[in-house]
Image: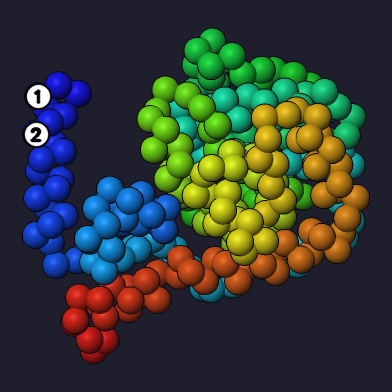
Amino acid sequence: TGIAGSLARSLQRRYFRDSARIFTMSEGMNAHFAKMYPDTVPKLEVLPHTFSAPRTTSTTTCSAELHHPCRLVFIGTINQSNVEATRRMFQVIARHPERWHLDIYSPSNKNLLEMKYGLDLSSEGIVHRGSVPQEEVHAVLQECDICLLTHGFSGEYSEVEYQTIFPTRTIPLLLSGRPILAHSPPHAFLTRFLAERDCAEIVSVDDPDALEATLDGLIAESGRRALLVRNQLETAAYFYGPDVVARLRTQLGMGLE
């Protein structure tokens, strides 16, 4: 804001004008900057987050049989990028501890989440297990039936951020071999990305009842879960590290040797 904001906007315009190539983290960021600087569209290239594990990391197939209660898992940081949607998701799960069990693996402090953000992490069937080492994430996901992914509808961040954020925790979920239930607003790039690839069951409305109905439907439809997992593994290839590096080298005119 103020003088600093004016200077930042002036510098950004200059950098975008004079750069030979502009790398962004997602197609959503590309779309945002294309609207701001339409003359730079030919320069815009996506350089997404990557993973370096084998293309097919899942060691098990999507099972038609689920645990009872159904095991749900949430991984990742909880902050202003997703807390509002996360709170709604957790409230829905707390309704029926006899049907669902949720494990939360997050470095976000439990007391802070409860006191500052108003998350109920002490309800029956909800367990905050703290952080999990990156190398153990895949094994943790194998113990669940359904992965949860949340993206804020609103909060303290700017509207542009909610439109363009792409949570990095999406990648291990795509590789998990477990179906994803995503709660994400309709205007977000994440929502479009998942919908276009049909790689998550999406609830894009601020409606707890819709969340509950969608979760019940996903639990009931083994064929739908299997289809989502197949699409997830195909989608994950977009983030495969060696392929992303190869695209970067090509874009920079470096060749592949």
Spatial separation of the CA atoms under disc 2 and disc 1: 6 Å
Is residue 110 depicted above or below 230 in this figure? above
Image coordinates of residue 214 in percent, x first then y, are 80, 42
Q: Residue at x 35, y 56 (%)?
A: 30
Say whether residue 49 is left or right of residue 173. left
Are circles 2 and 1 on residues that touch, CB within 8 Å? yes
- Which residue is denoted by mark 2 in the rendering? 7
Image coordinates of residue 126 in percent, x first then y, are 72, 27
Image coordinates of residue 205 in percent, x first then y, are 68, 35
Is residue 33 depicted above or below 80 in this figure? below
Question: Is any part of residue 139 visible from this angle?
Answer: no
Q: Residues within 10 Å of mark 2 (few under 14, many from 20)?
A: few
Q: Residues within 10 Å of mark 1 (few under 14, many from 20)?
A: few
Judging from the image, what secondary structure is the residue with disc 2 in?
helix
- Which residue is denoted by mark 1 in the rendering? 3
| Foreground residue among 235 and 124 | 235
Q: Residue at x 67, y 61 (%)?
A: 198
Instruction: Give the image quarter of residue 58.
Output: bottom right
Image coordinates of residue 172 in percent, x first then y, are 55, 55
Instruction: Give the image quarter of residue 185.
Output: top right
